Image (cartoon, rainbow, N blue to C red):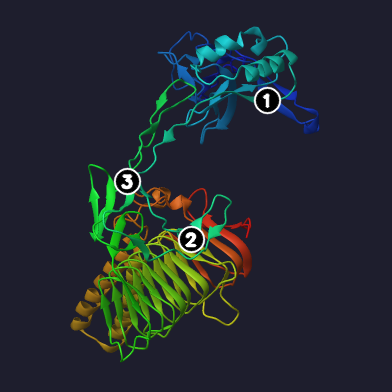
Amino acid sequence: MISPSTPPQDNVVHYIEPYRLFTSIRMEIGESMGGEEIMVSELVRKDQLLLEFPNLIAPETNEHQKQPVALGANCYFSADHNQVFAAITGYPKVTLSPVEGKDTEILNISIEPLFRISADGMKAAIAIHPAISGTRSLKDFSLTELIAEAGIIYGIDKAMVDKANKCIRAQLPEFNIIVLATGTKPRDGKDAYLEFEVETGPVPGKILEDGTIDFRERMIFVPVTQGQVVAKKVSATRGTAGKTVLGERVEPQPGRDIAINTLKDASYSSKTKQVTATSDGVLSVVGDTIIKICSRQEIMTDIDYSTGHIHSRNSVVIHGSVQPGFKVTTDGDLEIRGTVMSTAITSRANIVIKSGILGKNSTISALGDADLYFIEQGEVECGRNCIIRREIYYSTVIAGKNILCMPNSAVVGGRLVAAGNIILGNVGSTNASPALIAAGVDGRRLIQYNDLQKTLIEQQDSLIKCIQLHKGTSRAGMIKKLEKEIETTRLQLQKLNLIPGTGRLSRPDDDDEFSPSGGITIQDIKIEIHGIIHAGTVIQIGNKSMTLNNTISNRLFKLNDSFSDIAPLPLRRRRT
């Protein structure tokens, strides 16, 4: 108890201090503490009186006032503010902080809960503090009744309750936290998917259960016959609800439905949920939901003057190379077994190129996956995964899903941009221009962002020239116009959101970047480097970027816990 202050003097405020109705002492805790003492308080019950001001003979005046009291967590005032009560069962904590410009201190009081319940309600633990001799402690109460009073009714572990009771009876001079109850987390529903009735082979770049990546070549040109059931849609499930330790129901996230898109000689029945071939042909599967059935076309030679450009509504295999300037466009899957040299290749399905892609004018475009051996000074854009089996030299690769390279592959210069994850071997070299490795980024928007940066530089240069060359009143008008254009471009740069699936000009605040509405889950995006990555390489995840100052190896790049910066973490090597 704190005694009242000395009688007031002229022009001196007399602060009346409250009585403390609980005991707190300093206690040496545990042998490992080396004799250090910690403040320990007795256990107080819910609605127990903690502080009380003495009855005042006269009302408060400028010279006669109660000491300021600030309530922390789990406390409440009486109606007249003369008393403070505990809102829950727990351990009181009192601190004093000075009041600026006054000769007094604020008394801060809070209650540390006896039971700690996790934010998601899935864990409940008891905090057992050392008992103070001569005061009430946990041994004076029924732990079962205290648990019920706290509202913990589900997932109680009897063995852990017994352990806690044993610890309480032992009255050890140390702090203990024991988990007494565990809730059941909801099991989210499974998304709808297509279950194929024909052998389609491995999914390129699929990450297997043991962490390895399946780099086997995909099976394309799978033959089907008229009337054959190709695939069946498996409906989404609702999931199973969970329950917190407080008995509250936690709803699951239902699985997402998919829209089946059939093209050419394939048909989907919403009644039977089956995809059927309407004629003989070969199967093309684009992503997870697009199915095409086309005829198979084989070209045994190079694509050159003897064949001309190739525009095919079928699936095509080219046994030779594609010579400079000769274009190839297909509706179905495309396999090229030779080299692609300075030309444009387009498939509205998947592309497999067994040899290299050479030349600044080489552009590869696929609606689905692109599986390539190596690419030098070219451009690749695909709607799904891009697989690189050997090298990427000063090229641009944009993928609507992931970019995956074999462990011994090399990336030198250029830009790799994926809406999903990026997994690479070695990146950069001592004398090469730095590469940009961007994951969780919309490739088209990144190009727009780079264009805006160039525009800003040009506008700033124009402003400098205007200041140097022009004089008089016309100069002021021109400068004002240029400054307005610069400000507009800067604002567009600041707002342009690079995260796929989000609004183009709706960049969220830093604190919200991990959960943009309708976008990807940016906190799950990663960049894995399974070899050496050289200094100068630019790493980008979502709207955040960093430039490596040092050459390092075997790193996992992800956004940090606050989603404000990219963290380079040690990489656990995958099994090969």
Q: State which tag comes first along the sequence, 1 or 3.
A: 1
Kind of residue at badge 3: Lys
> In the figure, 396 relative to 496: above or below?
below
Question: Is residue 46 among what the camera can see?
Answer: no
Q: Are marks 1 and 2 in contact (CB under 8 Å)?
A: no
Q: Name the residue under label 3.
A: 233
Disc 3, SS: strand
Disc 1, SS: strand
Residue at 44% over, 32% down: 186
- In which image quadrant can residue 548 be found? bottom right
Q: Residue 506: image x %, image y %?
A: 30, 55
Q: State which tag comes first along the sequence, 2 or 3.
A: 2
Q: Name the residue under label 2.
A: 205
Kind of residue at badge 2: Gly
Say which of 203 and 422 sits in front: 203
Q: How crowded is mark 1: few (under 14 residues within 10 Å), some or many (20 or more)?
A: some
Q: Residue 137: image x %, image y %?
A: 66, 12
Residue at 46% over, 50% down: 523
Q: Distance between the residues labelled 1 and 2?
A: 47 Å
Q: Name the residue under label 1.
A: 176
